[in-house]
Amino acid sequence: MNFKSFEELIQFAVEKEKEAIAFYESASIQESYSGGKETFLEFAKEEKKHQVLLEGFLKGDKKLGDYKLKWVPDMRRSDYMIDLKYKKGMAYPEMLRLAMKREEKALQLYNDLASKSEKPDLVKVFKMLSQEEATHKLKLETIYDDYMAKMGD
């Protein structure tokens, strides 16, 4: 992917956030487990925050310098899982695995784009997005591990 401008990149990222919001909202609606509903709604809220942050860059309300990069550990749990396709009525652990894989792929995308970018502003945006996706991946992997431990796995 080649972005001709900073604005084009941000608009691409906003669309990705909208897709993630729709996924998590849909997952919360179909989830019968109340803890799962709350989990997916919380992730939808997080994605909305990202959308607002990115739109702030477009409007000039936010500056890249305002964002602090930090290292996020990676449990690599999802790295060893197979891809799943969404099916209505999926069990909670399957939905968590699906969400983990989505975050993993988003993280890979933004890391790849950062490594291919030559403009410092674009690299920083991609690193920022990578960090956000890594944070989500870690949260989901932790939730999954905790849930599976409760189930005796």
Image: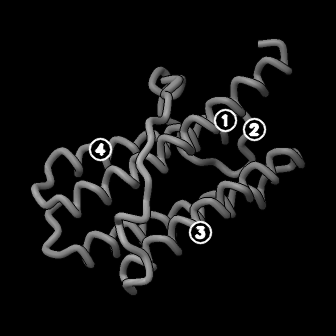
Residue 111, relative to residue 78: is it above or below? below
Question: Which type of secondary structure does the marked residue at label 1 adopt?
Answer: helix
Q: State which tag comes first along the sequence, 3 or 4.
A: 3
Horizontally, residue 50 falls left or right of residue 43, namely left
How many C-alpha atoms fall within 10 Å of the one at disc 1: few (<14), some, or many (≥20)? some
State how far apart marks 1 and 3 are (Cα): 23 Å
State how far apart marks 2 and 4 are (Cα): 30 Å
Q: Report which residue position mark 2 lands on.
A: 91
Q: Coloring scheme of the render?
A: one colour
Horizontally, residue 78 falls left or right of residue 149, namely left
CB contact under 8 Å: marks 2 and 3: no
**Residue 111 badge:** 4
Q: State which tag comes first along the sequence, 2 or 3.
A: 3
Q: State which tag comes first along the sequence, 1 or 3.
A: 3
On the rendered image, what quadrant is the C terminus found in?
top right
Q: Report which residue position mark 3 lands on.
A: 48
Q: Which residue does the image show at 81% across and 53% down from the upper left?
A: 38
Expressed as whole percent of the image width and height from the top left, the position of residue 103 reads 49, 44
Question: Which type of secondary structure does the marked residue at label 2 adopt?
Answer: loop
CB contact under 8 Å: marks 3 and 4: no
What amino acid type is highlighted by mark number 3? Lys
On the rendered image, what quadrant is the N terminus found in?
bottom left
Expressed as whole percent of the image width and height from the top left, the position of residue 112 reads 24, 44
What amino acid type is highlighted by mark number 1? Glu
